[in-house]
Amino acid sequence: MPVSVQDVVTDALSLVDFIQFGEAPPPEAQALAVRTLNGMLGEWSTKRYMDPLQRSYDCVPANPGKIIIGTDTTTVPPPDILADLTYIDSVIAIQGQVVFKLSPISLAEYMEISVKVTTAIPAVYAWDYQKPNGAIWLFPQALSNLAIRVVGMPKIDLAGSQSTIDLDDSYYEALVYNLAVRLYPHLKRDAGLDPTIVQVAQRSETGLKDRNRRMRMRRARVPFATSGSDSSYWTSPLNTVSP
């Protein structure tokens, strides 16, 4: 279930002895804690090993040469995909039951293509990341009514005082203790920061990082693999090591 912002803020302020356990924080401290929490969530959103969110989005682009992706619906035309992505992991063209994986290129490489109006199954894409709306440029341009699927990592939504954070409760300890560490420079005390808080903050991220890495880990591919079930490096012609 999502994590309560108020619980995270109250517990973090209690850890640094700014408030007593169970006490409601004053408005100024509440606002500071929420701003600091949002700064931390923004940093986590840029780290693939901390942000666990993963989504796929299907669309038929209004413009065959690009997919508009973003959060501003007042533009003309509006976004084909309504999302705030930090990373794109794959772009796939779908024709019936067949899928075609597009290869990523840079926007500079896309701009170097001379004739961009060719229409076919797209082979490459270039992501022009802008706020609030960006574009995924396709080459060749997509065939009419061709569906495109984008798989990516959305940014963790900003938190409001009485809202929830779109993370499961396994993140609770990491949120509370890391927020406490970040709040301490604003709310220093003579006794200093309890070292246990720093230790728990660091330890609480370990399992989350490992899980998120494994979730996005692709299958290893080696150049000497064969289709035989008994193939190995030792039977490969690339092996020059004597028995």
Image (spheres, grey):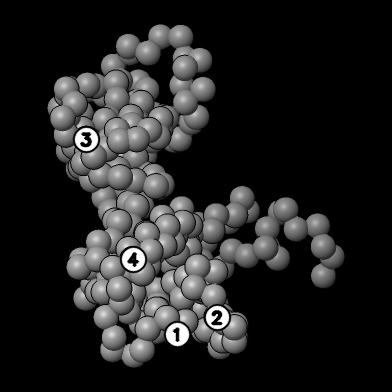
- Which disc number belongs to residue 28? 4
Circle 1 residue: 17
Q: Spatial distance from mark 4 to mark 2, Cα to Cα?
A: 18 Å
Q: Is residue 133 above or below residue 116?
A: below
- Position of residue 23 measured from the top left corner of the image (x, y, whole percent): 29, 86
Give the number of the mark in front: 3 or 2. 2
Q: Secondary structure at mark 1?
A: loop
Do callouts 4 and 2 mark residues in contact (Cβ within 8 Å)?
no
Q: Nearer the viewer, residue 80 or 12?
A: 12
Judging from the image, what secondary structure is the residue with disc 2 in?
Answer: loop
Question: Given the image, on which type of amino acid does mark 3 rest?
Answer: Asp
Question: Is any part of residue 218 visible from this angle?
Answer: no
The residue singled out by tag 3 in the image is: 72
Evaluate if marks 1 and 3 touch, with contact meaning CB atoms under 8 Å apart.
no
Looking at the picture, how far across and down is residue 15, in whole percent?
44, 84
The CA span between labels 4 and 3 is 31 Å
